[in-house]
Image (spheres, grey):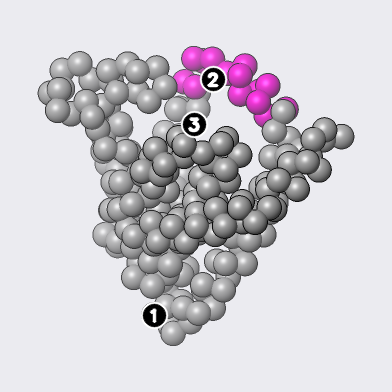
Amino acid sequence: MFPGFEDALVQVVSPQMLLLCLAGVVGGMAVGATPGLSATVGLALLLPITFTMDPTSGLVLMGSFYVAAIYGGSFTAILVNAPGTPSSIATTFDGYPMTKQGRSETAIIAVTTASVVGGLVGVLGLLLLGPLIADVVLAFGPQEYFWFGIFGLTMIASLAAKSLLKGFAAGFLGLLIAAIGIAPVGGDVRSRSASPRCRAASPSSWPSSGSSPFRR
C-alpha cells in the first residue's frame, strides 16, 4: 500500500537521525518557549544549516524542530499568559487560569498528552490522506481563495458576538497589517502607496502573539 515505507522507516530510526531529531526537539522547544520567536521564524533561521545536509536529514531536523516549537509555545502560555507561538494562544484560555489555581503541572501534562496524541494522529492522517489532499489543493483558484477570505471575515461576527465593535476593530487592524509588505506566494506588492521600508513587513503572527496578554 505504501511502497518504500519500510526502507524509509529503517532510515529514520538510525542513530544519526535520532540525534538530529533530539537536537531539533531541544532547539525547537527553546525557540517556541520564547515569546516573539515563532516556529516559522525558527525554521527560517535553521534553514541555512540544512543546506549542507542530505534531504532526509534536513527534513528530520526541520520537522522535529517545528513540532517541538509548537509544543514549547504552550509553556509560556500556561505559566505567564504569553504564548510563545500563535498556535498556543488558545492554551492561555484554560492554561493560565489553571496556573493561578496552582494547577500548572496538570495543565502542562494535559498539553503534553494532547501534543503527542495529536501529532501521531496528524502524521497518520497525512500518510493516508496526503495524496488526496494534494489533488484538492492544486485545484484551488482565485475564486476559492476569495471565498476563504470571506469565510474568515464572517468568522469575526461569530467569535466576537459579545462585542462586535471590538471584533470588527481587531479585524480591520488585521487587514491593515496584512496590506503591508509583499505577498509570500506571488511576490506582488500589496500596498503600492506604502514606503519601501514597509515592504519587508513582519509576519502577521507577531501581532497576534504580542497582543494576546492584553486581550483582557
Task: Please say whether residue 170 is visible from this viewpoint.
Answer: yes
The answer to if 133 sits in the magenta stretch is: yes
**Type of residue at label 2?**
Glu
At x 63%, y 61%, the residue is 116
Most foreground residue, 159 or 78: 78
Left or right: where 163 falls relative to 140: left
Quadrant in the picture for the N terminus: top right
Q: Alpha-carbon neighbours of circle 2 within 10 Å: few (<14), some, or many (≥20)?
A: few
The answer to if 159 sits in the magenta stretch is: no
At x 42%, y 74%, the residue is 97
Which mark is on residue 151?
3
Left or right: where 216 falls relative to 143: left
Q: Which secondary structure, mark 2?
A: helix
- For label 1, the residue is 100
User: Is 205 above or below relative to 78?
Assistant: above
C-alpha span from label 2 to label 1: 44 Å
At x 51%, y 39%, the residue is 53
Q: Position of residue 139 (x, y in %)?
A: 62, 16
Q: Main secondary structure of the magenta part?
A: helix
Q: Which region shows up in magenta?
A: 132-146
Q: Earlier in the sequence, mark 1 or mark 3?
A: 1
- For label 2, the residue is 144
Nearest-to-viewer mark from 1 and 3: 1
